Amino acid sequence: MRAPITISALTRADIAAVTEIERQGQLEPWTERSFIEELDRLHSYMLVARVDQNCPGIVNQPQYDCIAGYICYWCVADEIQILNIAVQEKFRGRAIGRALLSHAIRDGCERKARIATLEVRKSNIAARRLYEAMGFRIVGERPDYYEVQKEPAILMELTLSNRPAGC
Ligand SMILES: CC(C)(COP(=O)(O)OP(=O)(O)OC[C@H]1O[C@@H](n2cnc3c(N)ncnc32)[C@H](O)[C@@H]1OP(=O)(O)O)[C@@H](O)C(=O)NCCC(=O)NCCS
């Protein structure tokens, strides 16, 4: 079931909530400082997805402010690099990851990016399926890339100019 969401720029006021979601959902979570540094970087962009209504199960936890997920990406030269994406566990499987990634790709297109790139843990099937569903293809592998639970990174790429819908 799709969740009604609004996507907007991540602000300082969101950092405590996204840091907590990050801590709960990632093997090597970004810290509060990581998000602050990205906010200060000119080529870095971050979006949050907020659940509009019926925020089930989290209404009593105001620190989450109904934030269901977020994405961080860089726009550098003709490339967007997806650095981080996560959806709070209880909101997964409702097309929120897809919506965040679509937003980032559209933004990259508007900024004249030619390709989108990312790295993902080899064992992270949910994320790999999401990227494949969005048209990313595997272009390489970096052995022992991740420190925690040592494993390779799969490198993926999406050529934006070849997308059927264009940019
Ligand atoms: C990866 C992640 C962001 C996906 O978010 P999500 O909102 O649950 O994904 P969506 O509902 O938009 O799913 C889009 C597509 O991804 C794939 N997908 C998502 N979750 C999946 C799962 N658990 N197993 C297999 N495929 C999955 C499917 O192809 C799905 O399309 P479909 O629903 O039409 O079948 C989420 O699982 C997450 O936050 N994981 C923890 C953090 C993380 O690993 N981030 C990526 C770091 S590289």
Image (tube, helix red, strand yellow):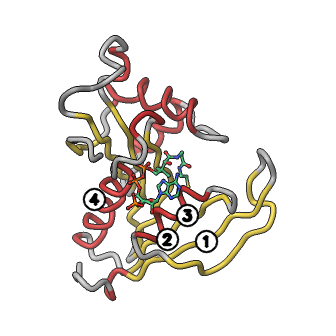
Contact? badges 3 and 4 (CB < 8 Å): no
Q: Residue at x 30, y 23 (%)?
A: 65
Badge 4 density bin: few <14, some 14–19, many ≥20, Cα 10 Å = some
Where does label 4 land, which residue? 103
Q: Is residue 30 left or right of residue 152?
A: left
Question: Residue 151, image x and y in percent?
Answer: 78, 58
Viewer-proximal residue, 68 or 36?
68
Badge 2 density bin: few <14, some 14–19, many ≥20, Cα 10 Å = many
Q: Distance of mark 3 from mark 4, alpha carbons? A: 18 Å
Q: Residue at x 42, y 56 (%)?
A: 73
Q: Amino acid at mark 3?
A: Arg
Is 34 located above or below residue 124 in the figure?
Answer: above
Contact? badges 2 and 1 (CB < 8 Å): yes
Q: Nearer the viewer, mark 3 or mark 2?
A: 3
Where does label 2 land, which residue? 117
Q: Residue 155 bears which disc, if any?
A: 1
